[in-house]
């Protein structure tokens, strides 16, 4: 008889097993990663290109190219593409980021064969219509102008400019002049060079039937390789911390951003730093939330986070407060950092944050598409297959003394860039 007065035993999780990936090298140089799961009759096909901001020869190219890719091909207009995708109840989008660009298709397994010819047309014969290009530039410039009225946009852009350098591809945001300077000829050249399958990674997951796999292999193998290799792209990073203030007299709220560079995902300290970040401001029960939201009542929310890119990791703290409390908020943030550096995290708090972190990680690996995203991170960041099991082990075993040591090393106030946007304050 089950005794419901006794709580179930808590099981420690020390490892995680992602689905085995079947990796095939295609004749044109692309790698096809297949991860099988037949719980639902759905598929995800994602083609990842070296076409993010890191690889663009001129600012704005990666963004505009990705946005234009679905605006027409030699055989399909933009409307026909949208109608066909809608008819089959599918989803098709092209997105770019700081490092890569991705063309992603979600569909029912039974509809893949009808959608593959459209996909091939998009990656081989887009037309980039001039009329759509002009409209896209106009819309983008208008959106940027609107974003520039927001403190959060200005603060994040200035923080990343200060940390990475004004022309670095990891700077957040764009300028209207940059968008205006992009030409259609540049778009076409960037597409031909960077949207080649030769150096792409193709992630195919879900209910993959043999017929679908054979069709995808045949179609992707038909796409010729690009004989010209991508140029080696390097962007220098010379970080010097600064304090910045943008005065906006008409704003009652001040946006606060405090950040610096942290190690890459493959660094030995990275997993433990993730836990340190959680304690500081990485979840609703964090120290920053308890202090600045619950105790002081300065804000509705404050956070700290890590933005892991292929060539740098950005750590930063963010919040919005009444301008009269902005200087005090910065003081309290630095106070919480000082406590982390000089006082050991109590075991009870550490165990609670450990359990939250591990539980959230497991919850975020709930279905095949979540698992593929985690596998994709291993591929793009060149990490070993046992990376996540090691991550869980580090989280479970890190000591309070080690966390204090990491806080002393990576959270030195003199290494932090501080940005405030709002009414006049003194840092």
Image: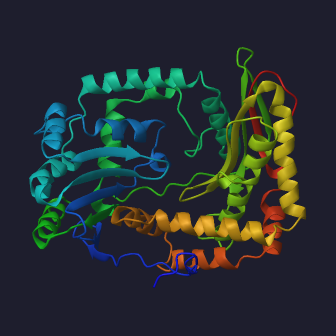
Q: Position of residue 416 (x, y in %)?
A: 79, 48
Give the residue drawn at x 30%, y 75%.
23
**As drawn, is 303 to the left or to the right of 294?**
left
Residue 21 picture quarter: bottom left
Of all residues shown, which one is farthest toward the right? 342
Q: Where is residue 111 shown, x and y percent of the image?
A: 12, 55
Instruction: Give the residue displayed 32% in from the left and 31% down from the top.
Output: 184
Image location of residue 91, percent across then percent down: 25, 46
Q: Residue at x 16, y 69 (%)?
A: 213
Position of residue 48 in the picture relative to residue 295 (left or right): left
Q: Residue at x 78, y 33 (%)?
A: 244
Viewer-proximal residue, 422 or 288? 288
Mark yes or no: residue 265 visible. Answer: no
Vertical relation: 303 (above or below) 352: above
Image quadrant where one finds the C terminus: top right
The residue nearer to you, when weighing 300 against 215, is 300
Q: Tell whether 375 sits left or right of 359.
A: left
């Amino acid at each position: 008889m089950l005794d419901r007065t006794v709580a179930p035993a808590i099981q420690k999780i020390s490892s995680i097993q992602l689905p085995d990936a079947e990796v095939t090298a295609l004749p044109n140089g692309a790698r096809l990663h297949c991860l099988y799961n037949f719980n639902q009759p759905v598929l995800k096909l994602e083609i990842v290109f070296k076409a993010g901001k890191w690889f663009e020869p001129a600012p704005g190219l990666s963004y505009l190219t990705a946005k234009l890719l679905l605006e027409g091909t030699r055989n399909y207009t933009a409307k026909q593409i949208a109608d066909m995708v809608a008819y089959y109840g599918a989803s098709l989008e092209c997105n770019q980021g700081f490092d890569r660009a991705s063309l992603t298709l979600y569909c029912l397994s039974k509809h893949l064969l009808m959608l593959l010819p459209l996909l091939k047309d998009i990656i081989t014969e887009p037309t980039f219509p001039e009329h759509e290009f002009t409209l896209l530039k106009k819309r983008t410039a208008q959106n940027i102008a609107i974003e520039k009225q927001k403190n959060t946009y200005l603060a994040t852009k200035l923080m990343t400019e200060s940390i990475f350098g004004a022309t670095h591809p990891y700077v957040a945001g764009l300028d209207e002049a940059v968008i205006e300077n992009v030409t259609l000829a540049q778009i076409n050249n960037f597409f031909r060079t960077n949207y080649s399958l030769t150096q792409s990674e193709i992630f195919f997951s879900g209910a993959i039937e043999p017929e679908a796999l054979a069709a995808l292999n045949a179609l992707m193998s038909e796409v010729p390789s690009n004989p010209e290799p991508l140029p080696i792209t390097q962007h220098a990073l010379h970080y010097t911390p600064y304090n910045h203030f943008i005065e906006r007299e008409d704003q009652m709220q001040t946006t606060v951003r405090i950040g610096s560079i942290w190690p890459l995902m493959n660094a030995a300290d990275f997993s433990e730093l993730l836990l340190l970040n959680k304690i500081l401001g990485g979840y609703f029960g964090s120290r920053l939330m308890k202090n600045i939201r619950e105790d002081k009542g300065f804000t509705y929310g404050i956070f700290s986070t890590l933005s892991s890119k292929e060539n740098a990791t950005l750590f930063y703290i963010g919040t919005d407060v009444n301008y009269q409390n902005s200087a005090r908020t910065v003081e309290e943030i630095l106070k919480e950092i000082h406590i982390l550096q000089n006082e050991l995290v109590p075991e009870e708090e550490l165990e609670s944050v450990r359990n939250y972190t591990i539980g959230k990680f497991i919850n975020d690996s709930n279905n095949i598409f979540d698992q593929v995203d985690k596998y994709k991170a291993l591929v793009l960041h060149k990490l070993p297959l046992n990376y996540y099991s090691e991550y869980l082990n580090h989280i479970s075993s890190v000591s309070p003394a080690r966390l204090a040591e990491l806080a002393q090393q990576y959270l030195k106030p003199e290494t932090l860039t501080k940005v405030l946007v709002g009414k006049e304050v003194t840092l």
